[in-house]
Image: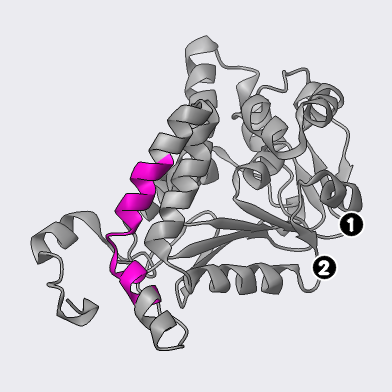
Amino acid sequence: MSSDTIPRVDPALVAGNQRPLAGYEARHFQWSVKEGVATIVLNRPERKNPLTFDSYAELRDLFHQLKWADDVKAVVLTGSGGNFCSGGDVHEIIGPLVRLKAPELLMFTRMTGELVKTMRACPQPIVAAIDGVCAGAGAILAMASDLRLGTARSKTAFLFNRVGLAGCDMGACAMLPRIVGQGRASELLYTGRALGGEEGERWGFFNRLCAPEEVLAEAQKLAAQLTEGPSFANGITKTMLHQEWAMTIEQAIEAEAQAQALCMLTQDFTRAYEAFVAKQKPVFQGD
């Protein structure tokens, strides 16, 4: 049966599981969607784009909503004014935290952790465009992204140790070693020192470096390339990359067998075969 004759999804099911986000009006950062690529810009350049209680919560909720977005295939995350993100705002977050008691502090740390969870759980690949300062929670946002483009002048620092806190913040002790290795992650988390752009590329933290004036455009170009691929299958890849951290090799192979069989049922798989036979480039539609 040709993919053109396959019945479409029941509208009632679509209504409950798909919703557009292009028209979303962000309150605490900039948000735009163009041809399937959403761009989030942390936009407080006067303080190097720090996070606040409000921006943490809005980012958490927005990444959660991306599970159902039918008009967003990839996400670009960046900062304005030549910096990525300086972490939690000293005056609006750090100051209030020192006056809170344990239940409220746990409420805060769970909220920040939920942001990482929703970034990892949304099916869209996240490309971080990182220039200048990328510190504290900003370094965590970069770490939680799927791909990272940096610049030679970028400085990534997991600063928690320098403010009297443990490096085990927002999943850093679990995720960072998987990106740069246990020894290198230990160094960054114990010392809080800055990882320069060229060193970050050598360590594998950055996929590649770009000129500062080009890093956002390159990230958007990469994201656009991802939107041309099979978005359903890309979402499965992201899910498996995340879930297989906690699996044995045997469990991972079985889980991938099931996931790949599911992808073979998609129309994109059929389109790829038909395009190959016709010596054409497949046009994927994400179903």
* Pointer 1 with pointer 2, Cβ within 8 A: yes
Q: Quadrant of the N terminus?
A: bottom left
Q: Find numbered disc 1 in the image and state the secondary structure of the residue it sits on.
A: loop
The residue segment tinted magenta is: 256-272
Q: Specify the principal SS of the magenta part.
A: helix
Question: Residue 49: horizontal and vertical position, in percent?
Answer: 69, 52
Q: Find residue 133 and report its horizontal and vertical position in percent.
A: 80, 49
Q: Earlier in the sequence, mark 1 or mark 2?
A: 1
Q: Quadrant of the C terminus?
A: bottom left
Q: How many other residues sit within 10 Å of disc 2, few (<14), some (14-19) or many (≥20)?
A: some
Query: Which residue has dot 1 on it?
Result: 153
| Residue 73 appears in the picture as rendered | yes
In this figure, which residue is indicated by the disc labeled 2? 212
At a point 46% along the width and 37% down the height, the residue shown is 253
The image shows residue 18 at horizontal and vertical percentages of: 25, 60
- Whole-number angstrom distance, CA of label 1 to CA of label 2: 8 Å
Q: Would residue 119 be found to the left or right of residue 149 on screen? A: left
Which residue is farthest front?
277
Residue 108 appears in view: no
Looking at the rendered structure, the kind of residue marked 1 is: Arg
Q: Is the residue 150 above or below the residue 222 in the image?
A: above
Q: Nearer the viewer, residue 74 or 107?
A: 74
From the viewer's perspective, tell me whether residue 161 is left or right of residue 233: right
Q: Quadrant of residue 272?
A: bottom left
**Please, what is the three-letter code of the amino acid marked with disc 2?**
Pro
The reply, left or right, for residue 31 in relation to residue 20 is right
